[in-house]
Amino acid sequence: MSSVLEALRPAMAEAGVDALWISQPENLRYLSGFSSPEDAKLLITPDGATLYTDGRYTVQAAQEVEVPVHIARPPATLEHAASHLAGRRVGFEAAHLSVAAHQELQQHWQAELVALSGLVEKLRLTKSPAEIEAIRSAQAIADAAFERVRPQIKAGVREVDIAWALDTAMRDLGAEGPAFETIVASGVRGALPHGRASHKVLAESELVTLDFGAKVGGYHSDMTRTLAIGEVSESLRRIYNAVLDAEEAALSAIRPGVRTADLDTLARGVLAGFDLAEAFTHSLGHGVGLHIHEGPSLRATSEEVLAPGMVVTVEPGVYIEHLGGVRIEDLVLVTEQGSEVLSRSPKERL
C-alpha cells in the first residue's frame, strides 16, 4: 500500500493540492487495502494518510490497513481531519462526492477545496502482479462455472434459472459473488445488450447470450458467450460469425503501444464488411479491475494507449430488433510481448 501512496503523491503535487480526500470506494480500497471501502474515507497528506471509518470496523481495519485508522462517525470524522487541513488546498473526487457531502466539507474545513478527477484511476490502469492474479482467479472461476452450467442451457429452461445456476456455481467455486448482475438474453431479447435474465423460456432455433463474471478479493472478471439452441437460421449464423470474426481480429491486434481507438475501429470495420456496423451500438470494451467498468476505454474517441499490465475486455456485438443479438467477449491481459486471453471458455463457430 505504501508504494501506491508514494506513486500518488507526485500526481497530487502536479495537480497543485496539499492533500487528497478519497471517497470513491474502489479508489479507497486500492490505496488502503480496506475491504469495506463504501463505509470509509481516506485522507492523504504529503507526509501521511489516515483512514476514517466507524466502530463496526475497528477490528477489520486494524487487520487490513497499514496507515493510522481513526474510528468515528461524521461530523467527528471531518472535525478530526480539519486539524490537518487548515489553510491547505485539498483535492476531492469530483465524480463521486455528492453536493451535500461537498457542503459538509466546506462547513468543517478551513481549506480550499479543489475538484479533481482521474488521479487514482490513472494508477489503476496498470495492474500489479497481485491484482492480475486476483483477476485471473476470478476468470478461472467464471470459466469453471460456465463449464458446469453449460449442459443446463437448453430449450425449456428459463433465463432466470440459468443466471441463478451461474451465480450459485461461481460462489460454490470460491467467488465472493458475481461481478455484476448476470445477463441471460435469448431469442429476440438478445437485441437487448444488457438484457436482465427474465422468465422467458429458451426455445429451439434461437440464440442465447450470457454475460457474467466472478469477483475475487474485490477484483472482477467479465466474459460473454452466445450459444445456439439447436439449429438456427442462416441470418443468425451470419451475425454470429461476423461478430466472432470482429472479435478475433481485435484480439490479434492487442499489444503494447496500440491505441484503444484503433481496436474499436478495426472491429467495427470487420462488421462493416457484413453491413452490420450500425448494429454495433457500444464501444469495443473497457478495463476491468476493482470496478467492472474502468479504464482504459476501447472506444472510438479514446486517446488511451495499451501498456503491459492492463486488463481489458474485447466485446463486439450486433443487436437487431425483432430478430436477436450476438455478443462475444473475452478478458485480455496486455503483456510485454503482446497479450494473453484470460477467458478460456470455448467459442464455437456456427
Image (cartoon, grey):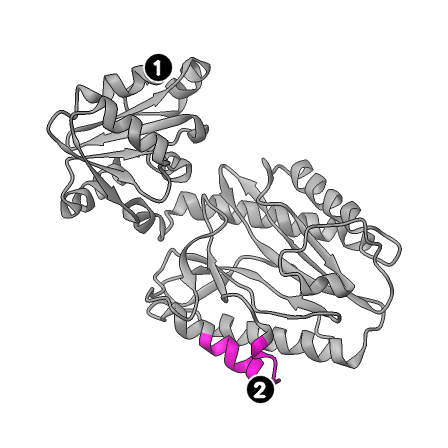
| 246 is higher (above) or lower (below) than 345 | below
Closer to us: 240 or 112: 112
Whichever of callouts 2 and 1 sits on the residue coming sooner in the sequence is 1
Q: Which residue is mark 1?
A: 71
Quadrant in which the C terminus is drawn:
bottom right
Q: Does residue 147 appear left or right of residue 18 in this picture?
A: right
Residue 206 lies, in percent from the top left, at 80, 67
Residue 191 lies, in percent from the top left, at 68, 65
| Magenta highlight: main SS | helix
Let me know if residue 240 is in the magenta part. Answer: no
Let me know if residue 274 is in the magenta part. Answer: yes
Residue pictured at 53% horizontal, 65% vertical:
282
| 289 is higher (above) or lower (below) than 111 | below
Closer to us: 138 or 166: 166
Which residue range is magenta in the image? 265-278
Q: Which amino acid is tagged 1?
A: Ile
Residue pictured at 43% horizontal, 67% vertical:
299
The disc placed on residue 273 is: 2
Q: Which amino acid is tagged 2?
A: Gly
Which residue appears farthest toward the left when viewing the image? Answer: 87
Residue pictured at 42% horizontal, 71% vertical:
300
Is there a contact, CB below 8 Å, between mark 2 and mark 1? no
Q: Does residue 12 appear left or right of residue 54 in this picture?
A: left
The residue carrying pointer 2 sits among few (fewer than 14), some (14 to 19) or many (20 or more) residues within 10 Å by Cα, namely: few
| 301 is higher (above) or lower (below) than 196 | below
The residue carrying pointer 1 sits among few (fewer than 14), some (14 to 19) or many (20 or more) residues within 10 Å by Cα, namely: some
Residue pictured at 42% horizontal, 13% vertical:
55
Rendered image quadrant of residue 208: bottom right
Q: Check disc 1 and report its element: helix, strand or loop.
A: strand
Rendered image quadrant of residue 59: top left
